[in-house]
Amino acid sequence: MENTILRCQQCNELFCPTHYDSYPTYDFDEESKSVREIEMDDQNVFRTAHEGHKISELHVINGSFCSHHAYWEPVREDYVLATDDSQTYTIRRWRKDIDEPLRYQIVNLQIEFGKPYFQVQSSELKKQMIADANTLKLDGTKIEQFVESFGSFVSSIKLEDTLECGLAVNDPMVTYAALKDETIETFLNYCYSMFTHEELKRLRIFIDENSSYDDVMNVRVIRSFRLIPTNKRFIPNPAFPLLLSMN
Ligand SMILES: [Zn+2]
């Protein structure tokens, strides 16, 4: 999502500049039987409509994007926080039809973020370890033990013990995180009583080879959010009292 959104302080309307704004559209001209290029500049349309009004820039707050729609879904509804440095706004972005442009609006809703939690990719991890059983030189029981230990170890770590390294394509509320080097060391110490020194050496290699992006040693970070209505009403900028009274 773009980082800057324009807001007309008088009308409270938004426009999100993108690099598609000045792309032309094409139309078939019946008379000349040819395709006509129609020049477009959506940002210019917005600025003309709000000529003489004060336009401010809102900056999207990193990590505040929330949605139940996959990134690739064209018909969607998302929420994000943005600030003009003096106030923070909740912005709704949506499109009801595939042919419509994305719309932006400041809404009287507060985003309440749930505490993120980890999910271990247990079944994927087990499958990968079974596939690598010959290299790992581990039997089914030891594999089971490793997967279980990893699950209980992860339940004791914090977000700071990991490095987020990828997005889940189908759910914007899910990311993938790799365990930091020192966290992996702690985990291997945790496994010390269950595995031999040689087994731990092979497990260390297995961990290193399966810790990129959505690999099986990486954990899913699940986030949730809730929208709570606020009673805040849009108070027009006092710089424009005259114009407003004419509406
Ligand atoms: Zn305006």
Image (spheres, rainbow, N blue to C red):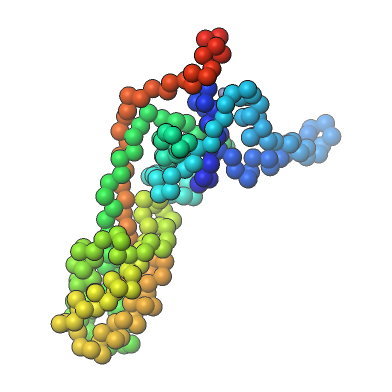
Which quadrant of the structure image shows residue 189?
A: bottom left
Vertical comparison of 54 with 173: above or below: above
Q: Which residue: 30% across, 73% down?
A: 182
The image shows a total of numbered marks equal to 0
Q: Is residue 180 left or right of residue 20?
A: left
Which percent across, then down, holds residue 10?
Answer: 53, 22
Q: Pick the residue in front: 130 or 219.
A: 219
Viewer-nearest residue: 127 or 178: 178
Query: Splitting the image into 4 quarters, where does residue 37 fall?
Result: top right
Task: Note whether 169 is above or below 147 in the view shown.
Answer: above
Can residue 94 be seen in this snapshot?
Answer: no
Task: Residue 58 in the image: state x and y as whole percent.
Answer: 50, 37
Q: Residue 55, how many percent across, how many down?
A: 57, 30
The answer to whether residue 228 shows anywhere in this view is yes
Depth check, front residue: 212 or 157: 157
Q: Quadrant of ligand 1?
A: top right
The answer to whether residue 1 is left or right of residue 45 is: left
Is residue 77 left or right of 183 when viewed as pictured? right
